[in-house]
Image: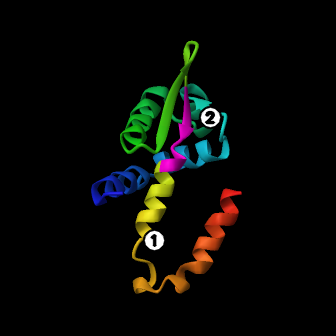
Amino acid sequence: MESENAILAFAALAQSTRLDVFRLLVKHEPEGLAAGEIARALAVPQNTMSSHLAVLARAKLVVATRQGRSIIYRAGLKQLDGVVQFLMEDCCGGRADRCEPAKKKRSRAAI
């Protein structure tokens, strides 16, 4: 992952509503949620929610798919994994053995 993509992801998540949206979508994997459901769950006006979802989509942290008349949003877990990999890339000053606890936690979480 390039630094610019990581910065976009960090910037998107550096706002409380967007972070709440992303966390909510992670909880609803793999089904996802419609924008209206997300707005109601977080008590955010729908037009405001649309703006937040657009920022998250530009950062590839949400993926939108059309199902009939609804647009279903899902967490961009692949992008999140890329951000985590980006952070871990130079982990522990090149001492990979020091990173093992974090890698093991990630592996167990993926199961």
Q: Is residue 65 left or right of residue 93?
A: right
Residue 68: % across, % down: 58, 13
Please tell me which residue is depicted at 48% across the width and 46% down the height of the picture: 17
Closest to the observer, 10 or 40: 10
Callout 1 secondary element: helix
Residue holding disc 2: 32
- Badge 2 crowding class, 10 Å Cα cut-off, few under 14, some 14 to 19, many 20 or more, is many
Q: Is residue 91 left or right of residue 8?
A: right
Task: Name which residue type carries label 2.
Answer: Gly
Instruction: Reply above or below: 41 against 18.
Output: above
Residue holding disc 1: 88
Task: Name which residue type carries label 1.
Answer: Met
Identify the magenta region.
72-78
Q: How is the image coloured?
A: rainbow
N-terminal of the pair, mark 2 or mark 1, is 2
Cα separation between marks 2 and 1: 28 Å
Q: Choose top left, top right, bottom left or bottom right for residue 3.
A: bottom left
For the residues labelled 2 and 1, say whether their Cβ atoms are less than 8 Å apart.
Answer: no
| Number of numbered callouts drawn | 2
In this view, the residue farthest toward the left is 4
Please tell me which residue is depicted at 63% across the width and 36% down the height of the picture: 41
Closest to the observer, 34 or 43: 34
Q: Quadrant of the N terminus?
A: bottom left
- Badge 1 crowding class, 10 Å Cα cut-off, few under 14, some 14 to 19, many 20 or more, is some
